[in-house]
Image (cartoon, grey):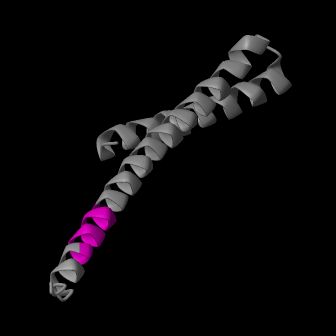
Amino acid sequence: MSEIKKTILDIIFWLALIIGIIMVLWRIFRNSPTDIAVISPFIVMILSKLWTINNEYVNFRSDVKMSFNKVKEDISRIENKIDGLKPKSRRK
């Protein structure tokens, strides 16, 4: 995930958190916003955090897959070198 996309999602998360806290306080002291208006910033906050975690998980999986492929290639090269060092069997 690009750093710009992650930064945007983090900004959305913090804005939703701040708006959610303001809405809850407004609801407690003034009884003005509806329940949906109070809950919706927290839903946006949770969704943005889940999106960030999902993107990081996908990046992690691709990194692990590349690492295992590199290890597989290294092991293949080592096996080829070992096979080259084995003495040839003599035929009688």
Q: Is residue 77 magenta?
A: yes
Residue 1: give x, y in percent of width and height.
34, 42
> Residue visible at 62% across and 36% down?
17
What is the x, y in percent for residue 66?
A: 31, 55
Depth check, front residue: 83 or 31: 83
In terms of depth relative to the viewer, which is nearer, 90 or 78?
90
**Residue 83: quarter of image:** bottom left
SS assignment for the magenta stretch, majority: helix
Residue 84 is situated, as x and y percent measured from the top left of the image, at 15, 81
State the residue at coordinates (25%, 64%): 73
Residue at 30% across, 41% down:
4
Residue 45 left/right relative to 64 = right
Q: Judge whether residue 82 can be spotted in this image.
A: yes
Res 33 seen here? no
Looking at the rendered image, the quarter that the C terminus falls into is bottom left
Residue 89 in the image: state x and y as whole percent: 19, 85
Against 66, is 30 above or below? Answer: above
Q: Which residues are magenta?
A: 70-79
Of residue 13 and residue 76, the one placed in the foreground of this image is 76
